Amino acid sequence: MLSAPALAVNGNTTNETNETNNNLYEELNQSVVRYNDGISDVPQLVITVAGNEVILIDIDMEDGSNLMIEAVTNNGMITSFDEVSSAGEVEPTMVIETDEETARTIIDSDTPLRTSMNAIDQGDADVDVSGFIKNAALRALRVLY
């Protein structure tokens, strides 16, 4: 992650960086609301993979900073979705890494699950889960979507 002086050299101020991160965070937060509202439509495989997890989402922003979010799920519902300042604040059971462009593509997609699986297949996103069953379910999602 670039420091504030490095960002200023690149033409970005700390306020611009925070604004960009906040905008993406707010867009993601709205996606969480839509996801939770439509939980009955979520495939069981998704709930198997991410149904009861502490998820660290690490997004490489276009300005060189990182947006890090802790998402907590319970029976498939996202019960907590908070921006964190470092990965050390989270004890994740799942880690999702991607970049800003990919995150925005997923948010804007009419088929976010399919778009997410395509991003993983193309190497634009990485999901690290623990356990045989969760890894098998993630592989099945990648094949099905």
Image (cartoon, helix red, strand yellow):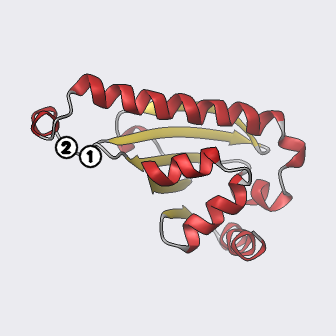
Q: Quadrant of residue 68?
A: top left
Name the residue at the right extreme.
Answer: 40
Secondary structure of the residue carrying tag 1 is loop
**Decide: marks 2, 1 in contact (CB < 8 A)?**
yes
Residue sitting at 75 percent across and 69 percent down? 145
Residue reaching furthest top?
15
Q: Which mark is residue 2?
A: 2
Q: Amino acid at mark 1?
A: Gly
Tell me the residue at 69%/66% (across/down).
Answer: 134
Residue 138, percent from left and from top? 68, 68
- In the image, residue 102 above or below residue 142: above
Tag shown at residue 47: none
Q: Amino acid at mark 2?
A: Leu
Q: SS class of the residue under badge 2?
A: loop
Query: Is residue 130 at all visible to an observer of this figure?
Result: no
- Asked if residue 43 can be seen in this view, the reply is yes
Judge left or right: residue 106 versus residue 97.
right
- Residue at 46% x, 56% y: name it: 97
- Residue 84 drawn at (x, y percent): 42, 33
| Mark 2 nearby-residue class (10 Å; few <14, some 14–19, many ≥20) | few
**Which label sits on residue 64?**
1
Label 1, residues with CA under 10 Å away: few <14, some 14-19, many ≥20: some
Marks 2 and 1 sit apart, C-alpha to C-alpha, by: 6 Å
Which percent across, then down, holds residue 133?
Answer: 72, 70
Taking the spot 62% from the left edge, 39% from the top edge, the residue there is 72
Image coordinates of residue 82 in percent, x first then y, are: 52, 30
